[in-house]
Image (spheres, rainbow, N blue to C red):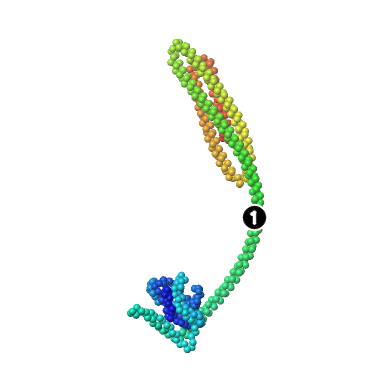
Amino acid sequence: MEKEYPQSAVVFRNVGQRYFPQTRVECHYSVTSAHQWSSRDWIGIFKVGWSSLREYHTYSWSLVPEGYTEGSDVDCCALFYAFYLPGPSTTEYHFVYVDKLGKVCGQSRAFTFCAPKPLDELETLIEERDEEDGDGEEEKDELLLVVPRAQLLQSELEERLREKAELQQAVLEARQEVEEERRSSTKAKEEWESERDKMKVEIHQLCQNLTRKCDALKKVEGKHKDVESTQEHLNSELSQLMGEKVQSQQQIKDFEDEVKVLTEREKETNVELERLKEILMKLSSQIKHDEEKRKLLQTEHQAALTEVRELQSRLDASERSAEGLRGELRALGVCQGRADTELHQSRLQVAQLGLQLSEEKLLLREERANWGLEREAFRSAAQADQQKVEELRIEVQRKEERLQEVTTKMEQPQAEFWSKSDINSADRRSDKKQRMLPALVDPVFSELTASIMW
């Protein structure tokens, strides 16, 4: 009788006490509702006392009939073919049901495999069934199964023949595989030897190339040190030139400040001339108004003449201040000439350094590019300064024209009181002053423009 375990989810049925290894073995079992069947469940034949699932002798996949629904009880059957069964012995075995997770769900009672005896014509199997009577009590019935001995021998013969054919086929395939493996190993060995020779040649070439590159690297390092020393020398010279450049720019700024001062003085002179113009206009209107009463107002006429003389003296003072401005402009011209000489020397030094820098143009390309950008910025600034100077020159010319107009208007009232000789001498002085002022101003502005453009 099969021993049943209350907690087993799978129960084995009709397990015999002895099986013949020459015939197919059928394993009947029942899957209860407590077990969730999977196609990866299997049944193995284990020796009694096994300790690991890897100790199975053979196994078969668990199959369920068609129409099976999960959670219901079902009777199943697994087949173990004679070729995979253990040989006859007194060792005890039993069936073990294992699910997909490797968990044991059921185990049958023990049985053995033995060889049939000549007088053994039948094999008896006992099937145990449970039935309930009307009072709720369980009754156990036993069913005997008889198998003919001739059927067992026929099955064994078929299994042996099939086993022999399979063994012959396996031997033939093994020989073919051995032959193919031998050929492939020979070919692989030849390829490996040729590849090894090539690798030796490549390694030798790489060693030579490495030696040459090491020598070249040492030479390059020596050249690099020379270039670094040359670059440091050039950087020091460049810093000196930059300092001289800053000094030149400072001098130019000083000149510009002086020009601004002169411009302010000129503006003050123009304001004074405007005031004198207004006074002369008032005098002219007064003289025209008092022309008919000249005899009665002789005393007032004398006072007017005195005031005109004072105005003439002021004009002379203005001319003297203009002479002082011309002297200052001459001094500025001398300073500008000195600055031009220094700038010319700086140009010569820069030209010499340019010849040296051309030899190292690959290493100092970035510095030259930055210097070019700065030079463009200085050029644009010089152009802006030149435009300002031109505007100042135009403004000076405009002031000169206005001064000439004022002088002309001043000479009109004087013509009625002064003698013709005095008027001619004043005309000559004014014409001389008008001719000399542009002659003195134009060279100074031309020199300032040339220095700013550089």
Residue visible at 44% across and 14% down in the picture: 290
Viewer-proximal residue among 10 and 385: 10
The answer to which quarter of the image holds residue 9 is: bottom left
Query: Quadrant location of the C terminus?
Result: top right
Q: Mark 1 = which residue?
A: 213
| Residue 431 seen in the current view | no
The answer to which quarter of the image holds residue 188 is: bottom right
Farthest residue, direction bottom? 119
The answer to which quarter of the image holds residue 316 is: top right
**Residue 219 placed where, x, y %?**
66, 51
**Residue 278 placed where, x, y %?**
47, 21
346 to 11, vertically: above or below: above
- Residues packed near mark 1 inside 10 Å, few (<14), some (14 to 19) or many (20 plus): few
Left or right of 453? Residue 96 is left
Farthest residue, direction left? 134
**Residue 6 placed where, x, y %?**
42, 75
36 to 378, vertically: above or below: below
Q: Amino acid at mark 1?
A: Lys
Residue visible at 48% across and 23% down in the picture: 274
**Residue 255 placed where, x, y %?**
57, 31
89 to 212, vertically: above or below: below
| Residue 311 seen in the current view | yes
Secondary structure under the numbered disc 1 in the rendered image? helix
Viewer-proximal residue among 112 and 115: 112
Query: Quadrant location of the N terminus?
Result: bottom left
Tally of numbered tags: 1
Residue visible at 50% across and 15% down in the picture: 306
Viewer-proximal residue among 379 and 177: 177
Residue visible at 33% across and 79% down in the picture: 135
